[in-house]
Amino acid sequence: MPSRPSSLGAEFEPTVDAYDIDFVVPLTHRLRFTRDCFGDDFGVLRDLFEPSAGRPARVQVWLDQGLIEWDATLLARIDERFKLAGELELTSAIKPLPGGEALKNAANQIDHMLAAFDEDQLDRRSYVVAIGGGAFLDAVGYAAAIAHRGLRLVRLPTTTLAQADSGVGVKNAVNWFGKKNWKGTFATPWAVVNDLGLLDGLSNRDFRCGFSEAVKVALLKSPPLFEFMVEHSRSIARRDMQRAEQALRQSVLLHLQHITRGGDPFELMQARPLDFGHWSAHKLEALTNYELRHGEAVSIGVALDTAYSYLTQGLPLKLAEQTFATLQDLKLPIWDARLVDGDVGKPVVLQGLEEFRQHLGGELTITLIRGVGQPINVHEIKSDLMCEAMRMLQHYSSSDVSRQTA
Ligand SMILES: NC(=O)c1ccc[n+]([C@@H]2O[C@H](COP(=O)([O-])OP(=O)(O)OC[C@H]3O[C@@H](n4cnc5c(N)ncnc54)[C@H](O)[C@@H]3O)[C@@H](O)[C@H]2O)c1
Ligand SMILES: [Zn+2]
């Protein structure tokens, strides 16, 4: 029988055959807020890069082309900033790529990124800077996470959705087998910089999208943010940047708090509370061939699970109606006819429940709400009542026309 060398602790007693050792990995989540990160605030970004073994930090930068279409001078400005920074080595020219969901559907682009990492000999202490929308960050983040089992990823989210939610997420993914986020990893970014100025180039449609995640997280966790959204959604839709910034900051901090203090950053347990409204949203995105933006699909999904919460969990009707009106004031949809495609009584979107369950494994667990800040997990969704929730949304979405034109 082996005896225990003196350097082994008691829990590593060599005479047993089964070991269950809990361990904790220390991680730091860095989030910064700036207004002009390639201008006056560049120092905030630069300070995130640590020299390695006496050599300047090595940095490769990827840029969502959506931003170049908005500002043709941006690429040259970023390039100059990095080159003049000192203490930094830009390993090659800044790499533009078309962003949006198409990037997550394009398998060859991941290989393209990996080849570029290899060509510049990036290692685990090198930095990949991804500047772009949520889809861009997901795809570049996925490539960075699998290269050498993880390069340091600095995310600069450039959509409201990514600044409100996905930028601080500890996940990345691309779509595979025609399924959303099938391929991906959990990986904590080295840092996230939310720069308000980068949002200027967004279309009104994309600008409004992110606030569905703010409404989502408010319903789950924050009565004050919910009240704020009810009150200010119209001015946010008109791009009142002061109100928009307040909503984005509250939203991202609630997400950050959940990830760092919620006890389950890598979603090992069954519930995915931040995914309120997402089982149908993900299905709708695929059903519409990604014609609906994630934020629009989330708006519909949040409205749907809010209606279902009213029908099954005693959520007060007034709160459900306030939620629908707030989303509509943000000029976001709460209804799409494609929700009810398929058999009467069993719309195709309900397949999203099984896909959601399969993604996580185990028992179906859907988060609903009993009130604002009062989430509850359920393990069964009743098709007939979900269909009734859909009819409710159809009704409220058409009544919005009369409210807006009244
Ligand atoms: N990893 C996570 O935790 C997580 C969480 C939520 C959402 N997501 C993912 O995020 C994606 C949605 O991201 P999104 O809503 O940010 O949209 P998006 O990334 O699809 O971008 C939408 C469009 O805006 C363009 N664009 C981006 N920034 C711009 C700017 N500042 N100016 C002009 N154009 C700009 C893009 O090129 C694209 O065409 C989905 O794939 C979703 O699954 C991931
Ligand atoms: Zn989302």
Image: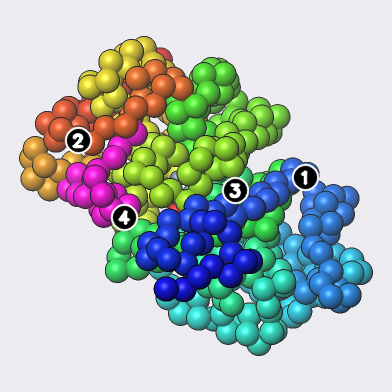
Q: Amino acid at mark 4?
A: His
Q: Are the residues flagged by discs 4 and 1 in contact, CB closer than 8 Å?
A: no
- Helix, strand or loop at label 4? It is helix
Q: Amino acid at mark 3?
A: Val
Magenta residues, as a range?
Answer: 348-367
In the foreground, 91 or 123: 123
Q: Which residue is mark 1?
A: 34
Of the image marks 2 and 3, the number of the one nearer the N terminus:
3
Q: Amino acid at mark 1?
A: Thr
Looking at the image, in which quadrant does ligand 2 appear?
top left
Query: In the displayed structure, does residue 359 sit left or right of residue 7?
Result: left
Q: Which residue is mark 3?
A: 168
Separation of marks 3 and 1 at Cα, in angstroms = 15 Å
Q: Residues within 10 Å of mark 2 (few under 14, many from 20)?
A: few
Residue beneath the point at 51% across and 47% down = 265
Separation of marks 1 and 2 at Cα, in angstroms = 43 Å
Q: Which residue is mark 2?
A: 380
Residue 126 placed where, x, y %?
A: 72, 72
- Name the chief secondary structure element in magenta: helix
Residue 270 placed where, x, y %?
A: 34, 44
Q: Nearer the viewer, mark 3 or mark 1?
A: 3
Query: Relative to 206, is 130 above or below?
Result: below
- Helix, strand or loop at label 2? It is loop
Q: Are the residues flagged by discs 2 and 3 in contact, CB closer than 8 Å?
A: no
Separation of marks 4 and 2 at Cα, in angstroms = 16 Å
Query: In the displayed structure, does residue 40 sit left or right of residue 263?
Result: right
Q: Quadrant of residue 346?
A: top left
* Viewport quadrant of the N terminus: bottom left
- Residue furthest out toward the bottom: 119
Query: Relative to 126, is 261 above or below?
Result: above
